[in-house]
Image: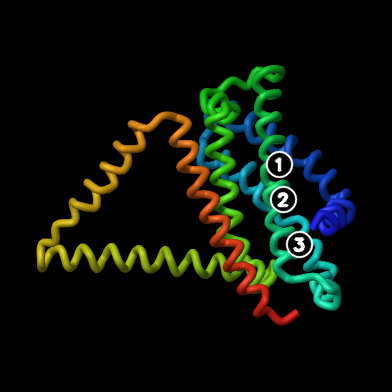
Amino acid sequence: MINLLRKDFRAGALYLLGIVLLLPIITILTIGTMIDVFGGIIMSYFIFIPAGLCIAASFLFIGIDSAYETDMTYASLPIKRSMIVYTRYISSFILALSSWILVIFTCYISMTYLNKIDRLLEMLISFRGFFVMAIFLLLVISFLQPFIFRFGTGKGIIAVMFFMFCLFLIFQIGRVLLRAINVVFKLDLSFIERFIQDILQWMFQLEAFEVYSWLAGIVLFVILMSVTISILLYNRRDL
């Protein structure tokens, strides 16, 4: 695994340099534009741009392997496919978190030396903000990886978009059906809202360390499930 990671970072050295140079520039431009034009940071757009770039950067090595068809080379070597999956997850997490640390550092520089002060930027550079964004990045990558390992980079992204569209369609159809059923049968679904409120109330009563521990445990469980699914799908994939 160490050798695979070392090979990835050597092969992608120039691309990593591009990320190190490009990501702070885009982040500064995004911060400056939002503060000057909109009067402050719009969280949804800000997360979409720098965080989206961090997620894209996390798949750098997978993209390089797809471009040079190194999966075919791996298939001829005495390397277990599960080891390749583990390596790709570790490298993706390292790239994503390192890229976000670079974004946080850029936000700090923007506030300290460029006088781009904003309340949301202060939240992002705090420990809680970093922890929440780290969870978000890890969950998104864990969601995307099984599609990538099953279909490859290009087809995997298309499969993700199709899957998300189907989820959105099912959600909308479900809303219409529930509304129609509620008109006829007068269903009482308030217990769902009460259940969610009880969970939130229980979480608010926990200490900060306990909340972080619960969230870390949930994320770890999701990652393990994602890795397991990716290994099963990658073992069935024809290279």
Tell me residue 56's x, y (percent): 68, 53
Q: CA distance from mark 2 to mark 3?
A: 10 Å
Asked whether, in this view, residue 132 is left or right of residue 96, the answer is left
Asked whether, in this view, residue 95 is left or right of residue 177, the answer is right
**Label 3 near label 2: C-beta < 8 Å?**
no
Count neighbours of disc 1 (C-alpha within 10 A) and say few if under 14, some if 14 to 19, many if 20 or more: many
Q: Secondary structure at mark 2?
A: helix
- Which of these two is toward me, 26 or 108? 108
Residue at 81% of width from left, 76% of height from top? Answer: 75
When the figure is inspected, residue 155 is found, relative to residue 62, above or below; the finding is: below
**Label 1 near label 2: C-beta < 8 Å?**
yes
Q: CA distance from mark 2 to mark 1?
A: 7 Å
Label 2 or label 1, whichever comes before in sequence order: 2
Residue at 60% of width from left, 66% of height from top? Answer: 146
Count neighbours of disc 3 (C-alpha within 10 A) and say few if under 14, some if 14 to 19, many if 20 or more: some
- Which of these two is toward me, 22 or 83? 83
Q: Amino acid at mark 3?
A: Gly
Q: CA distance from mark 1 to mark 3?
A: 17 Å
Asked whether, in this view, residue 128 is left or right of residue 195, the answer is right
Q: Which residue is mark 3?
A: 63
Q: Secondary structure at mark 1?
A: helix
Asked whether, in this view, residue 217 is left or right of residue 197, the answer is right
Q: Which mark is residue 57?
A: 2
Q: Which residue is mark 1?
A: 99
Q: Is residue 69 visible?
A: no
- Name which quarter of the figure residue 70 lies in: bottom right
Q: Amino acid at mark 2?
A: Ala
- Name which quarter of the figure residue 23 lies in: top right
Label 2 or label 3, whichever comes before in sequence order: 2
Label 1 or label 3, whichever comes before in sequence order: 3
- Name which quarter of the figure residue 63 lies in: bottom right
